[in-house]
Image (tube, rainbow, N blue to C red):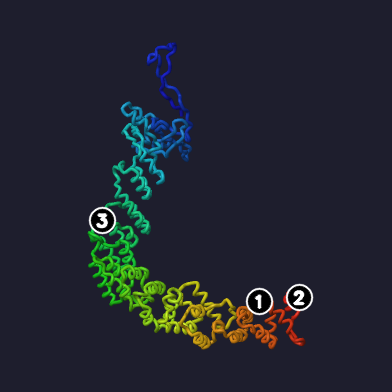
């Protein structure tokens, strides 16, 4: 294909000084040569923009018949957009709906364009095809808003009709996307330049997109899109609230429903809450928390909701649902004036630890100074949350006296010990007074009793788990070592009001006895030989040696007593040789010197080698 362009060239012998049209002449010359991809007939070429042209063409094919003859088949004419310089096809051709095209010839068509008309020259020359190419991806939609100039109109003339060919506008792109079920793309294209829409309406596109998401089951995504798509249109919000409700998916939209800008009719908010009250208590509670105080004017009627909750409880034959009870408490807090006592009563009426958010119960007590209301409800607070109840009781000993708490918890010995242990660890100065001496005595008894099950003292803490392991070891008489110190021993070191002999008797009463605690207590009372006897009795030689090392300065005969005991028992002596060199410099030498000459000890040489080395030095 050869493209001809009309241009002005100098006339022959025209002289150089004249200028103007008298010295030039107009002629056609070949500007570009194209190589088409397939055989076709070119019926017309017209400028489309500075870089491309529109080509009117059709393909004629010959089909061989069975008798050897060939039949000509004419394809429907099409408009091709090609690069002006290289002739490359820039866009998928568009077929023209020409009546009787099968009977037309090349000469029956002509194509004209407004591109070069003087009246439209300025608008068309700034036009670019790339600004209006059909959008296939949402990322390219913004180009529609960057339109430059005005696209040309083309006219295709046939023997029977004149066809006006226009560039696809924004509506065409939207319609194309809708036909391909690309509802998100259609909406993005429309929203990129709303002023260019002529036929499609933005609310209709929003409707189709959200309906498509809901049809696919993507209710959460549809709900998340609503604030952006519905904006401040209260009518649209009310429609879609009812639409989600119809599909029983209102909980997906609830957190996106606006309470300001736009403010919907009070009946809509009450409709949402009533729907959740009867079908989804968790969503009912969450929505009330999210919307908060109904304010002025009211989002919904607090009185009406409280009445609905009471009616709901009656329908359930008094079986109150924890979520609805919490919602009722929230409504009492939001009342004008707030009814904090009623809100707290709602929480306290729940059975056991059924409160979904215990923190808000204790915040209500502290922030609204409701300590007097729970002074006789300590056990209920512990059931709601032992950790939070402990924090409140320790911080509020003035408002909730220690004696009042003890009166309520002492029937449950584990809870009683838990509370006393809290006082010991968190309020030692207050608790270590004579008026609480009886509690100290009880605490010692319960420490001994629950030594192997102490984890309940500090709920969920790593320290408690450690004490559990220690307690189990003590109960079994294990070789815990001098570093061992139980909760009982720690308490005895600080308490000013506990008789150590009473503590020793309590440890001895346990089955098995708490030997390690007894050793510590005997050490505290100065009964070192009794403590040493217990260590030897339980076979805890390593601790026995450390005990003598620690208390030998107070009782100089302890070393002699320990060595004498070892020499009287060959098995004990063997173990002593193994342990002595690890804990003492003096003891191995004394043992070696005093071993009877005729005593037979297996592998004595091996056992003595380290000790002899130190002795010979």
Check disc 1 and report the residue beneath it: 583
Circle number at residue 263? 3
Circle number at residue 616? 2
Q: Going by the image, does 319 lie left or right of 512?
A: left
Q: Residue 253: name its quadrant.
A: bottom left
Residue at 46% x, 32% y: name it: 87
Q: Residue 615: name its quadrant.
A: bottom right
Task: Measuring from the top left, give residue 203's x and y in whole percent.
Answer: 29, 50
Task: Measuring from the top left, give residue 89's x and y in whole percent.
Answer: 45, 36
| Along the viewing direction, whichever of 100 and 145 lies nearer the viewer | 145
Q: Earlier in the sequence, mark 1 or mark 3?
A: 3
Q: Earlier in the sequence, mark 2 or mark 3?
A: 3
Task: Measuring from the top left, give residue 57's x and y in whole percent.
Answer: 41, 33
Task: Measuring from the top left, give residue 334's x and y in whole percent.
Answer: 27, 65
Q: Dot 3: what SS?
A: loop
Residue at 43% x, 16% y: name it: 10
Q: Are marks 1 and 3 in contact (CB under 8 Å)?
A: no
Labels in figure, total: 3
| Along the viewing direction, whichever of 5 and 449 lies nearer the viewer | 449
């Amino acid at each position: 294909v050869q493209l001809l362009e009309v241009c002005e060239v100098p006339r022959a012998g025209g002289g150089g000084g004249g200028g103007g049209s008298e010295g030039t002449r107009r002629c056609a010359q070949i500007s570009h040569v194209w190589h088409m991809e397939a055989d076709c007939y070119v019926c017309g070429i017209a400028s489309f923009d500075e870089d491309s042209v529109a080509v009117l063409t059709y393909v004629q094919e010959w089909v061989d018949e069975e008798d050897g003859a060939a039949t000509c088949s004419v394809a429907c004419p099409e408009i091709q957009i090609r690069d002006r310089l290289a002739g490359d096809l820039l866009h998928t051709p568009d077929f023209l709906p020409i009546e009787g095209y099968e009977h037309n010839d090349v000469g029956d068509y002509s194509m004209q364009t407004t591109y070069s008309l003087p009246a439209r020259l300025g608008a068309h020359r700034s036009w670019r095809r790339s600004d209006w190419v059909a959008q296939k991806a949402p990322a390219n939609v913004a180009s529609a808003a960057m339109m430059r100039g005005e696209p040309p109109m083309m006219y295709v003339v046939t023997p029977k009709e004149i066809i006006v060919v226009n560039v696809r506008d924004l509506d065409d792109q939207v319609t194309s996307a809708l036909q391909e079920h690309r509802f998100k793309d259609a909406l993005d294209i429309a929203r990129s330049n709303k002023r260019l829409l002529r036929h499609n309406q933005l609310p209709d596109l929003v409707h189709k997109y959200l309906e498509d998401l809901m049809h696919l089951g993507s209710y959460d995504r549809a709900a998340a899109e609503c604030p952006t798509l519905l904006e401040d249109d209260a009518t649209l919000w009310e429609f879609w609230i009812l639409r989600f409700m119809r599909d029983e998916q209102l909980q997906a939209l609830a957190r996106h429903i606006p309470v300001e800008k736009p403010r919907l009719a009070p009946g809509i908010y009450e409709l949402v809450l009533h729907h959740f009250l009867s079908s989804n208590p968790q969503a009912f509670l969450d929505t009330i928390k999210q919307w908060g105080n109904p304010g002025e004017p009211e989002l919904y009627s607090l009185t009406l909701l409280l009445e609905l909750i009471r009616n709901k409880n009656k329908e359930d034959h008094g079986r109150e649902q924890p979520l609805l009870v919490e919602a009722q408490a929230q409504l009492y807090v939001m009342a004008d004036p707030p009814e904090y006592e009623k809100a707290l009563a709602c929480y306290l009426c729940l059975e056991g630890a059924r409160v979904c958010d215990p923190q808000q119960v204790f915040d209500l007590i502290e922030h609204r100074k409701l300590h007097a209301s729970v002074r006789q409800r300590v056990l209920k607070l512990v059931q709601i949350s032992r950790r939070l109840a402990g924090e409140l009781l320790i911080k509020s000993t003035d408002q909730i006296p220690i004696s009042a708490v003890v009166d309520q918890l002492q029937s449950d010995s584990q809870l009683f010990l838990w509370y006393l242990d809290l006082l010991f660890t968190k309020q030692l100065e207050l608790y270590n007074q004579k008026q609480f001496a009886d509690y100290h005595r009880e605490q010692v008894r319960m420490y001994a009793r629950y030594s192997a099950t102490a984890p309940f003292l500090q709920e969920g803490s790593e320290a408690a788990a450690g004490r559990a392991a220690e307690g189990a070891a003590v109960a079994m008489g294990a070789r815990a070592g001098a570093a061992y110190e139980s909760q009982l021993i720690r308490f005895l070191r600080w308490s000013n009001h506990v008789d150590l002999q009473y503590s020793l008797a309590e440890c001895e009463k346990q089955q098995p006895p708490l030997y390690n605690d007894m050793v510590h207590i005997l050490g505290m009372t100065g009964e070192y030989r009794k403590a040493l006897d217990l260590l030897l009795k339980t076979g805890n030689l390593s601790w026995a040696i450390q005990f003598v090392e620690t208390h030998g300065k107070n009782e100089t005969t302890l070393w002699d007593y320990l060595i004498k005991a070892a020499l009287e028992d060959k098995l004990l002596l063997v173990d002593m040789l193994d342990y002595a060199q690890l804990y003492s410099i003096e003891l191995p030498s004394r043992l070696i010197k005093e071993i009877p000459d005729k005593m037979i000890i297996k592998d004595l040489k091996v056992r003595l080698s380290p000790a002899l080395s130190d002795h010979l030095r």
